[in-house]
């Protein structure tokens, strides 16, 4: 326990408390009856997870809390081993009592504010602290039957799970931990995921007459340059997916992403990344029609994965692209002969609206961590959306990090047939190798000119050498010219599309995007705009009520999967921590 506390940078007083009272701690755990060593070891593992949880959310450590949690966990494990035939009772009095203790509000005097952080100016002399997420629910053992394990891991309970590194350690003893709802990371089982067959292509031809009058009325109340973040827009302009899922759709060519790691030189790897970057936006947009994805609710999450056959990951930048049309949906026949790319996104803030997403492929030792928030403004007959934030691609095998930004998006001709274009200058930089890239998405001039134009230039900064140039259309044909004179053409309309693998609605948690927005989506499919608007209003009103409640209790929102570091957000258990 000392080692665990020390590994999580626990303060000296916490470690000192354990060392000083170690005999008493052991006595509290073992004094009741002679016990098997397995009970002690399993209790210690659970207690270690609890210490991890306390430290993660900076909960002040006390011997009293430690004793209470140790005794409670011990009694639960002992009770199970004494002969709980039907598996642990999730509603047992001991578990209910501990859950109730953890749910109770704790009133913290200002004299304790050095432990909790400064209280904002103007707050009352006492501030109510809501309980943080705790390990409180149940234990499952490998000796239990499959049916008993299903009872403990019942998806209807919608609990989260401890971090994967702890799950790995606990797995040696056959333990799984469940947490309070919406409180911690959840385990997404590969066998639960199915190939996504939902088609979200938007086929509407344009704005109908009655809808145009609504937009005109809305426009009459806006001013040029006005921030639209808090403006409620009509439901009929929504596309049938969340913004979090839209970010996942940017990953629809995972073979190109995974091929980056196979580049033989830093120059080849940065060029491969630029090639992947430029081809990602076509599928992410789901057609040219300008519709707006759902604004994610704070705490909303989205999970999916891709399986990429190993023989489709081509390492050479000059290898010809697959001749398969974009209608092909490559599926790995044998998962053991494919790479697995996992994706998770979460809405971590409401004001500003910050979304985070993380994806990783353990076999290729590659991961991407991104945080971005959108800021929209009114531009007359257009709406502009700035993507503020950055992403980092990490190639752990090579020790390289590529920091990149995202372009702005514009919805044009909002009164007729709205369409989307991208615009602005973005950058890609690798500090270790000295390579960088500048990508410019060109907006269409008022008179003449082409739409969806993009140009890019890759440069080796130490020698001031341009090693690659690219031009074309981000949703059409792209042509690359390399420093050795070779050229390569990629037609984004013929690249193979890899479908997401996603769990069906009945196995998703209540805050997962498709489950959360399913009624809005259903009514949009039916063309019942009024019913869709009401469902959307209910979701947003619930978010506002919960936000007011947190404000009144001086409690900040605590995301499941991402931790704030400086101005950015980082996945709680990234791949680079394992290497």
Image: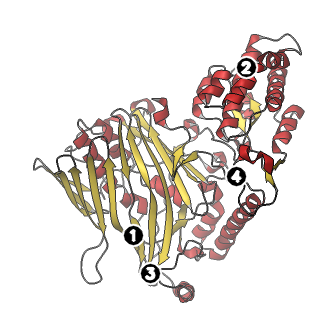
| Tag 4 near tag 2, CB within 8 Å | no
- Residue 144: tell me if it is visible: no
Q: Residue at x 63, y 66 (%)?
A: 520
* Residue that mark 1 sits on: 288
Q: Is residue 508 visible?
A: yes
Looking at the rendered structure, the number of numbered marks drawn on it comes to 4
> Do the numbered discs 3 and 1 sit on residues whose CB atoms are within 8 Å?
no
The residue that disc 4 covers is: 118
Q: Secondary structure at mark 2?
A: helix
Mark 4–mark 3 distance (CA, rounded to whole Å):
41 Å
Sequence-first disc among 2 and 1: 2
Most extreme residue toward the left, as rendered?
485
| Mark toward the viewer: 2 or 1 | 2
Q: What residue did someone put label 3 on?
A: 379
Q: Position of residue 19 (x, y in %)?
A: 73, 19
Q: Residue at x 71, y 67 (%)?
A: 541
Q: Mark 1 or mark 4, which has the lower sequence index? A: 4
Between circles 2 and 3, the one closer to the viewer is 2
* Marks 2 and 3, how far apart at CA: 64 Å
Rendering coords of residue 502 (x, y %): 54, 47
Q: CA distance from mark 4 to mark 2?
A: 30 Å
Q: Is disc 1 surrounded by few (<14), some (14 to 19) or many (20+) residues within 10 Å?
A: some
User: Which one is in front, 51 or 504?
Assistant: 51
Q: Residue at x 27, y 46 (%)?
A: 270
């Amino acid at each position: 326990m000392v080692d665990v506390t020390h590994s999580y940078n626990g303060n000296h007083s916490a470690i000192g408390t354990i060392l000083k009272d170690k005999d008493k701690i052991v006595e509290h755990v073992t004094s009741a009856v002679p016990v098997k060593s397995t009970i002690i070891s399993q209790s210690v593992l659970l207690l270690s997870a609890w210490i991890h949880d306390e430290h993660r959310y900076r909960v002040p450590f006390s011997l009293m809390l430690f004793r209470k949690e140790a005794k409670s966990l011990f009694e639960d494990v002992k009770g199970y081993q004494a002969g709980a035939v039907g598996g642990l009772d999730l509603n047992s009095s001991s578990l209910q009592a501990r859950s109730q203790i953890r749910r109770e509000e704790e009133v913290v005097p200002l004299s304790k504010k050095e432990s909790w952080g400064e209280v904002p100016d103007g707050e009352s002399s006492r501030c109510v602290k809501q309980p943080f997420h705790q390990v409180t629910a149940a234990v499952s053992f490998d000796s239990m039957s499959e049916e008993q394990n299903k009872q403990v891991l019942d998806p209807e309970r919608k609990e989260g799970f401890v971090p994967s590194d702890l799950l790995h350690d606990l797995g040696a003893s056959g333990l799984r931990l469940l947490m309070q709802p919406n409180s911690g990371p959840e385990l997404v089982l590969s066998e639960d995921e199915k190939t996504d067959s939902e088609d979200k292509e938007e086929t509407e031809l344009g704005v109908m007459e009655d809808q145009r009058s609504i937009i005109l009325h809305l426009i009459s109340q806006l001013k040029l340059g006005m921030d639209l973040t808090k403006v409620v827009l009509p439901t009929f302009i929504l596309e049938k997916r969340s913004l979090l899922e839209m970010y996942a759709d940017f990953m629809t060519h995972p073979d190109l992403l995974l091929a980056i790691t196979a580049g033989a030189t830093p120059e080849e790897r940065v060029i491969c990344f630029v090639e992947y970057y430029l081809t990602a936006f076509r599928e992410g947009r789901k057609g040219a029609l300008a519709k707006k994805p759902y604004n994610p609710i704070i705490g909303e999450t989205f999970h999916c994965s891709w399986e990429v056959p190993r023989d489709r990951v081509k390492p050479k930048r000059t290898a010809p692209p697959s001749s398969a049309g974009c209608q092909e949906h490559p599926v790995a026949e044998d998962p053991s002969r494919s790479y697995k790319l996992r994706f998770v996104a979460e809405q971590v803030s409401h004001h500003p609206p910050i979304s985070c997403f993380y994806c990783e492929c353990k076999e290729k030792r590659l991961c991407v961590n991104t945080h971005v928030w959108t800021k929209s403004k009114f531009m007359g007959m257009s709406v502009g959306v700035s993507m503020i934030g950055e992403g980092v691609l990490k190639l752990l095998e090579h020790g390289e990090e590529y920091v990149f930004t995202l372009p702005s998006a514009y919805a044009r001709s909002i009164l007729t047939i709205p369409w989307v274009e991208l615009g602005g200058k973005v950058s890609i930089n690798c500090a270790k190798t000295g390579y960088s890239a500048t990508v410019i998405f060109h907006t269409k001039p008022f008179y003449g000119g082409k739409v969806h134009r993009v140009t890019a230039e890759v440069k080796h900064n130490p020698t001031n050498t341009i090693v690659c140039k690219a031009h074309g259309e981000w949703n059409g044909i792209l042509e690359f010219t390399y420093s050795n004179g070779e050229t390569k053409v990629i037609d984004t309309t013929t690249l193979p599309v890899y479908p997401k693998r996603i769990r069906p609605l009945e196995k998703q948690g209540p805050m997962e995007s498709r489950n959360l927005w399913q009624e809005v989506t259903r009514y949009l499919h039916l063309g019942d705009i009024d019913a869709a608007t009401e469902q959307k209003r209910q979701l947003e009103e619930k978010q506002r009520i919960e936000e007011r409640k947190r404000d009144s209790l001086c409690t900040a929102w605590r995301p499941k999967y991402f931790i704030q570091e400086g101005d950015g957000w980082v996945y709680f258990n990234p791949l680079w921590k394992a290497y």
